[in-house]
Amino acid sequence: MATARHEEKELRRESIRPGQGEPVSLAAGVALREFVSQACQARGFSTGTATLEPGAVLPYHTHSFSEAITLLQGVAQVAVEGRTYQLQPFDCLHVPAGVAHEVSNPSAKSPMLALWAFASATPSRDLVETRFTVQPRGQSNPKPGDPESIVRFAEAEVYELSAGADFRDLFAGRFGSVGICGGYGKFRPGSSLPCHVHEYDESITIVEGQATCLVQGNRYQLSDCDTAFVPEGRPHRFINQTDVPMAMIWVYAGTEPGRALVESSYCDGTLAWPGRELAIPLAEKTV
Ligand SMILES: [Fe+2]
Ligand SMILES: [Fe+2]
């Protein structure tokens, strides 16, 4: 007899969240979009974007969970208790729970777009009134003892996860994040990741080009920050079927990345998914 936990698992399906849906205004010139959260039955994490018009400020606030901010477009200035850093595209700053931070767009003419990831399925923030002494840090990184951490895109280790697919981990437990990890994957034309499953939920945002997404026999086309929510244990893969590069930001509701490769028929739907325990593995190792 299936347990309540199993029945609940079966009911959770993937969903596709539009990258350019109607935003919510959080402050003057600050538009927030929510992609993955408890609203699509996600567990343990949430994702979305924040667009800041030139000169706009998302004032000092805290969260009761870890946050990772990955810049997608423009230039960002992130102040953490006064320590003020500049981020370039795909740089990632992680802020632990309870640490006050402020995000602003220092540009006079270009908007700024960032992807936020929280280690909670329920996004929330508490504004704080505290005044901090400004310590400009520019494009340098936090010092030992600072609670925040930064992974600079240009300095992140690149690894080829499969032929033509280059990955960089941008936030993870080993860099200081708690409960979430994520990174950037770039897919050359014709490249893909093999069909795989995870032990936690995943959010995948397409930040360049167009992706074909297969989830247990269902096929979707994603671009322009469209985001796929893939629940724990559902086989999926992403393919670049175009003749230009495709890139994604992936976020897991887990502290370190891990993927179990399985037979590709589970992704295209020609084989019924029997559950991870009975699945035909594609490789011995987990990558
Ligand atoms: Fe925040
Ligand atoms: Fe995945």
Image: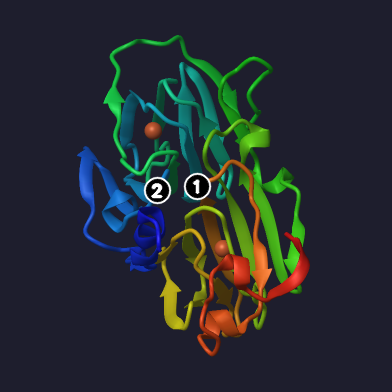
Whole-percent x and y of residue 253?
Answer: 50, 47
Q: Report whether 36 appears left or right of 99.
A: left
Q: Which residue is mark 2?
A: 43
What residue is at 32 percent from the left and 33 percent from the top? 58
Please tell me how crowded label 1 is: few (under 14), some (14-19), or many (20+) other residues with Cα within 10 Å.
many
Q: Is residue 111 visible?
A: no
Q: Which residue is mark 1?
A: 253
Q: Amino acid at mark 2?
A: Arg
Q: Amino acid at mark 1?
A: Ala
What residue is at 59 percent from the left and 23 percent from the top? 137
Whole-percent x and y of residue 271?
Answer: 55, 86
Residue 151 lies, with reference to residue 153, above or below; the image says: above
Q: Report whether 238 appears left or right of 22.
A: right
Return the residue found at the far front.
Answer: 1
Identify which residue, 11 or 231, lies in the foreground. 11
Mark 2 residue element? loop
Mark 1 residue element? loop
Ligand 2 closer than 8 Å to the CB at disc 2?
no
